[in-house]
Image (spheres, coloured by chain):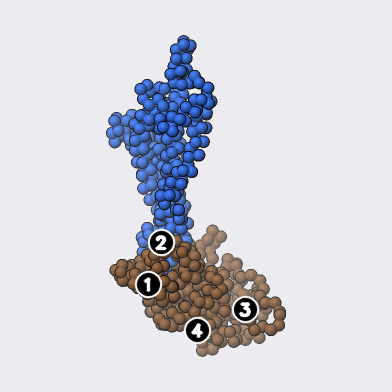
Chain colours: A brown, B blue
Amino acid sequence: MLLDVQNLTTRFHTHDGEVCAVNNINFSVEAGECLGVVGESGSGKTQAFLSIMGLLAKNGSADGQVYFDGRQILGLSGNELNNLRGVEFSMIFQDPMTSLNPFMRISRQMTEVLSEHQGLSEKDAVKRSLDLLDLVGIPEAKKRFSMYPHEFSGGMRQRVMIAMALLCEPKLLIADEPTTALDVTVQAQILELIARLGSELNMATVLITHDLGVIAGLSDRVMVMYGGRIVEKAPVRDLFKQPQHPYSKGLLESMPRVDDSNNKSLYTIPGQPPDLQALPLGCAFIPRCEHAFAPCENQVPDLVKISSDRFKACHLEELP
Amino acid sequence: MLSYALRRLGSAIPTLFIIITVAFFMMRLAPGGPFDREKQLPPEIEANILKAYNLDKPIHLQYLDYMKNILRGDFGPSYKYLDFTVNDLILTGFPVSMRLGLYAITIAIVIGVTAGTIAALKQNSLFDYLVMGVAMTGIAIPNFVMAPLLALVFGVYLSILPVAGWGGGAFKYQILPVITLALPQVAYIARLTRGSMVEIMNSNFIRTARAKGLSEKIVVVRHALRGGLLPVVSYLGPATAAVITGSVVIESIFDVPGIGRYFVNGALNRDYPVVMGVVIFYAILIIVLNLIVDLVYGFFDPRVKVE
């Protein structure tokens, strides 16, 4: 197991009191696999991985255990984490427009990673950076190397972000909604790139998204999050074929389908994402769930194993 | 970039023309004249003096004469400092004012940026509140209050610095004027730096820099500071002009022989050419400083193309 997360809980201290963004979640990532993480805004998917990276906002704190390659990394000091971040695991973000430093040339933003972590000379760092830019498919990398981020298009910037994240050959790449801010046509290219690099470099990838379509083609396993908890974990095929949690099912049904013959309007899950400061006593999905019954009211369902590689957190025996 | 600078200077000419014209007529609108005395001069003598200084002609002709002269770079004679031309006064006074101003702005940048940055990094800490509290006070107290206060404390009570005077430009005579000049600027720059650094430190690209595993020092100094200082850079043009011209009051209080003092005395004595000369000189100074800031801005922010 490359990444093993146990009982991870992330809290934020706000003026209105404490908010629990991630609530006692357990999951793992195997070396080389691609894990998809799906959920609406506020489901805790991004905060869970920012906790692992040690990149929470100042008012946030995380509890639990996170083992990377067998080593507990949650709660390490900034200096200790800096030996791992960008080296053993990297993260790329949603908005490539603002995620690159607008005041710095791409060249510097890339080579500084290598000189900081591997002590490479300027010349070697430049060579390695150019190799990576080639790898992620930036045409005329040499010419563009000394440009500033604003001289790149959105898709190209995300490619630069990916190249930058891969400089030290990390074992894990966490991609937080890497295509959300991009044109639809560019989205597919970037996803394809991430998938290709994952298998070529034998690197595990975590793909955080709110778009199940993104997950379908790329990940091996999917983890669905709702209200700060994991509600379902399954191999991607099984989830698409037979979702076991009403929320997963709702997500699948609200995806537009090209092959849908009858002109009925698109399904939406009724209601709003939960308010993390006022979660129901029982299951967080209860106000939006058509199958809710008595036990859901006052008991949060545990994430239980339902077959060798499937888990769900629902009181229903089986989804009708 | 050179052609941009030249174009900018060219476009400043109409501005300058308007400033000169307005200043010229406003000066004449002020009651009293340069040669009014408590004791009335005999009319023949007064007529002679007015004739000598070209003040007997109708005002529009005086204006045309004045414009012709300044086009030749001649700001005329001073009415009060006999045997001195305005050019002489500016040339002897300006180096003094500029020296005080540059000292003050340098101190303001160093202390203001440092304090503002630390306050931003330790947001909502005791240090932050302290710096911002002191800064607020520094901005709120006007220099004509601060100057006598400092003179009183350091000059009279503690007797470690001269109360006023210049002493031929000796170091100890410059300390209080420079501090008085620098204080509000330190305060303003500290607040400016803090505000923009707080914003930058919460930006996405700083999160990226951290995700790359860069040390906190590199994150702050290399990644955050450059963007964080942009508002300070834009402020420096007006600020530098302000500390050089702002010494008008301070120079009078501390009796410093800069151009500010000539300006105040000139205004009080209706010494028209001196006031006009200093106004024009300050106007040019501000125009040039703003141009320099815009050029430097292009260097700080690559998204801005100076062309």
Q: Chain of mark 4?
A: A
Q: Is the residue under label 3 in contact with that under label 2 (CB below 8 Å)?
A: no
| B170 or A289: nearer the viewer | B170
Check if mark 4 and mark 1 are on a common chain.
Answer: yes
Instruction: Pick whichever of labels 2 and 3 is earlier in the sequence.
Output: 2
3D distance between C-alphas at marks 2 and 3: 40 Å
Q: Is residue A41 left or right of residue B269?
A: right
3D distance between C-alphas at marks 4 and 1: 31 Å
Residue behind mark 4? A220
Instruction: Pick whichever of labels 2 and 4 is earlier in the sequence.
Output: 2
Disc 4 element = loop
Disc 2 element = loop
3D distance between C-alphas at marks 2 and 1: 17 Å
Residue behind mark 3? A255
Q: Amino acid at mark 3?
A: Met
Disc 3 element = loop
Instruction: Pick whichever of labels 1 and 3 is earlier in the sequence.
Output: 1
Which mark lies nearer to you, 2 or 1? 1
Instruction: Pick whichever of labels 4 and 1 is earlier in the sequence.
Output: 1
| A291 or B123: nearer the viewer | B123
Residue behind mark 2? A104
Q: Chain of mark 1?
A: A
Check if mark 2 and mark 4 are on a common chain.
Answer: yes
Check if mark 3 and mark 4 are on a common chain.
Answer: yes
Q: Is the residue under label 3 in contact with that under label 1 (CB below 8 Å)?
A: no
In percent of the image, x 41 and y 58: which residue is there?
Answer: B224
Question: In the rendering, which numbered label is found on residue A130?
Answer: 1
| B171 or A78: nearer the viewer | B171
Residue B198, percent from left and from top: 46, 56
Residue B201, percent from left and from top: 44, 59
Residue B63, percent from left and from top: 50, 27
